[in-house]
Amino acid sequence: MKSLFTLPDQQLVTLFIDGESQALDVLVNRHKVRIYTSIYLLVKDKYLAEDIFQELFIKIIETLKAGKYKEENKFVVWAIRIGHNLCVDHFRKIKGKPSIKTIDGKDIFEVLRFNDSNAEEIMIKRQSHDRIMKLVEQLPEEQREIIILRHFADLKFREISLMLNCSVNTALGRMRYALLNLRKMIEEQRVAI
């Protein structure tokens, strides 16, 4: 039998449904960074993102055990969609918008790791990310959401369109307008990136 770590997601889902609990552990570890990051960038609060992340996997377990999982999409896209819906539900409850700062006042990019070994490059990159994120924060919600899902959750436009229940062309259009708006803000505010 193959190692669980080498199996594709769908086989791991099937194994979990058949009672192999370690299969879910492999799935979680395989996709946790991508899923957590997409949640965190939507809620912009480390503790809330952790709560939603845990709630997400409770929902996933319940759905899988109830036999309601359909193989229409990749597991990770399905999981990110559930996470997105949980974020939307959270903000509907509080009727507010997420802020760009965490509880302790840090910018979201302070928690991201950079692979550069040079401290100066890291600082320059972090400053550029800070400037870009402040501009992204000013975008309309639909455009901000597309930027986050595409560039930070690393989803394809097809995956984003499925998640947001819109056409691929609508997702592409929102991205186009988001980029145009970002360029305009960079020029107007003379932001150095």
Image (cartoon, rainbow, N blue to C red):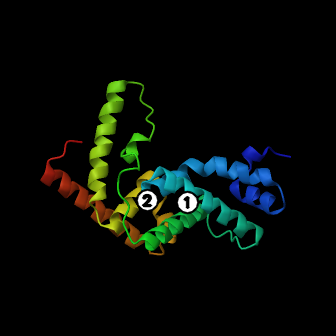
At mark 2, the secondary structure is helix
Placement of the C terminus among the 4 image quadrants: top left
| Location of residue 61 in the rendering, given as x and y in whole percent from the top left corner | 71, 63
- What residue appears at the point 45 percent right and 32 percent down from the top-left corner? 115
Location of residue 157 in the rendering, given as x and y in whole percent from the top left corner: 45, 63
Residue 161 appears in the rendering: no
Q: In the rendered image, is residue 5 in sight?
A: yes
Residue type for callout 2: Leu
Query: Disc 1 or 2, which lies upstream in sequence?
Result: 2
C-alpha separation, residue under disc 1 versus residue under disc 2: 11 Å
| Residue 28: % across, % down | 66, 51
Q: Give amino acid for label 1.
A: Ile
- What residue does disc 1 label? 52
Q: Observer-nearest residue: 180 or 26?
A: 26
Asked whether disc 1 touches disc 2, contact meaning CB atoms under 8 Å apart, the reply is no
In the depicted structure, whether residue 153 falls above or below residue 169:
above
Which one is in front in this view, the residue at disc 1 or the one at disc 2? 1
Q: Is 22 left or right of 182, judged from the image as shown? A: right
Left or right of residue 70, residue 160 in this image:
left
Q: Which residue is mark 2?
A: 42
Residue drawn at 33 percent across, 69 percent down: 173
Q: Residue furthest top?
A: 118
Q: Indicate the position of residue 104 as horizontal and vertical percent values.
A: 40, 45
Q: Few, some or many C-alpha atoms within 10 Å of disc 1 (few <14, some 14-19, many ≥20)?
A: many
Is 87 located above or below residue 123 in the figure? below
**Category of crowding for the residue at label 2, using alpha-carbon neighbours closer than 10 angstroms: few (below 14), some (14–19), many (at least 20):** many
